[in-house]
Image (cartoon, helix red, strand yellow):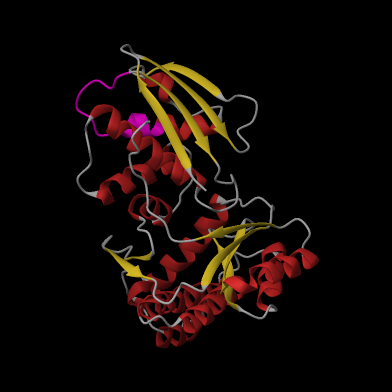
């Protein structure tokens, strides 16, 4: 699944963009003056907000040229598969090619795109989607440290006989600002009560401290998820490096259980998909992906179990659709033929 932007400079200030994407709605074409700040404000159609935000935030000291472009995307919208990050990073990469102004630090590129999400689309997202869209490397997972934004590409060893199966619940994922903020605020408050800068510095022993302070159970659950998920993430990176896919799968299962029970961002649809996948011989692990509240699950399984898994999951959840995925390269410029 890809998002591709093809275009060229027009020689004037006018931008004309046509979108051929899944679920763009009726309005798939926009036209505006690239040098008119008021025309770059958020509004309908929603997909154009991401494009205009990238234009507004693109770090170019000169005058941006007008252009004609077509955007084609096969990434499902509203599925928790980073369709907005793909559009942002794709637009930014197109603007680099158009102007010859290339960002030397890839993390800066990801941060600009995250800023677009925050201030133009109004979604208080984290940085993960933009980072993997910028820095993806074929055959590798990406270990991202959100505290200092350092990254490490982890080669996925012994993956040849296995694949990742993405299962779409077709129950639209909604990154609710209020739900996101509630969980974030719980974690900040827990950190504050522990006298720590963040839960990154906390351990399971600190949960007992929170209990001794008579903290609400919901705060303890949120903190427990974050503390254990950080440890699972580090263990998963080591497991991939060692080619221990069985351990990686167990960590996927534990992660989903924690997201469901402690962080409470799963949904009945996602739980059915995960439960059904785990019942199939050859499935190594399964969990929700994205922010939760609908969207997709991701399952690691043997290649020879894919057909059986799809058939079994379909029995339990008829609306499911499926994609086979493998770790691929991030955003890059392609030469037009």
Rendered location of residue 133, percent (x, y): 40, 50
Q: Residue at x 63, y 37 (%)?
A: 23
Q: Give the side of residue 78 with respect to residue 126, left or right.
A: right
On the image, the x and y values in percent for residue 50 come to 45, 35
Does the stretch in magenta take in 297? Answer: no
Read off the magenta span.
53-65
Please indicate whether residue 332 sits to the left or right of residue 42 in the image: left
Location of residue 320 in the rendering, given as x and y in whole percent from the top left corner: 71, 58
Residue 280 seen in render: yes
260, above or below 209, in the image: above
When asked about the image quadrant of residue 333, the answer is top left
Out of 106 and 305, give the one closest to the viewer.
Answer: 305
Q: Residue furthest top?
A: 12
Please give left or right for residue 169 compared with residue 83 in the image. right
| Picture coordinates of residue 175, whole percent (x, y) | 56, 52
Q: In the picture provided, is 161 more to the left or to the right than 138?
A: right
- Please tell me whether residue 16 is drawn above or below residue 79 in the rendered image: above
């Amino acid at each position: 699944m890809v998002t591709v932007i093809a275009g060229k400079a027009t020689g004037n200030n006018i931008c004309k963009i046509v979108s051929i994407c899944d679920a763009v709605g009726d309005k798939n074409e926009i036209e505006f003056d690239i040098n008119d700040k008021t025309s770059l404000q958020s509004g309908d159609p929603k997909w154009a907000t991401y494009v205009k935000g990238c234009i507004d935030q693109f770090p170019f000291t000169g005058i941006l040229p007008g252009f004609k472009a077509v955007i084609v995307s096969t990434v499902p919208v509203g599925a928790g598969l980073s369709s907005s990050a793909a559009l942002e990073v794709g637009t930014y990469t197109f603007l680099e090619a158009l102007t010859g102004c290339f960002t030397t630090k890839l993390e800066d590129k990801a941060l600009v795109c995250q800023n677009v999400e925050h201030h133009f689309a109004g979604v208080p997202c984290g940085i993960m989607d933009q980072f993997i869209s910028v820095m993806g490397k074929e055959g590798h997972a990406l270990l991202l440290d959100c505290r200092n934004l350092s990254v490490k590409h982890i080669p996925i060893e012994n993956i040849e006989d296995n694949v990742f199966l993405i299962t779409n619940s077709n129950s639209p994922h909604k990154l609710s600002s209020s739900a996101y903020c509630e969980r974030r605020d719980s974690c900040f408050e827990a950190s504050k009560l522990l006298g720590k800068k963040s839960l990154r510095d906390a351990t399971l022993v600190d949960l007992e401290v929170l209990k001794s302070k008579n903290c609400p159970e919901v705060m303890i659950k949120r903190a427990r998820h974050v503390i254990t998920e950080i440890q699972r993430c580090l263990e998963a990176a080591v497991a991939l490096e060692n080619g221990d896919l069985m351990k990686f799968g167990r960590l996927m299962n534990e992660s989903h259980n924690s997201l469901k029970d402690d962080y409470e961002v799963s949904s009945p649809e996602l739980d059915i998909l995960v439960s059904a996948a785990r019942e199939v011989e050859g499935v190594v692990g399964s969990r929700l992906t994205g922010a939760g509240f609908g969207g997709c699950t991701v399952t690691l399984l043997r290649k020879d179990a894919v057909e059986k898994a799809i058939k079994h999951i379909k029995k339990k959840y008829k609306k499911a659709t499926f994609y086979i995925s493998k770790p691929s390269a991030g955003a890059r410029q392609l030469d037009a033929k």
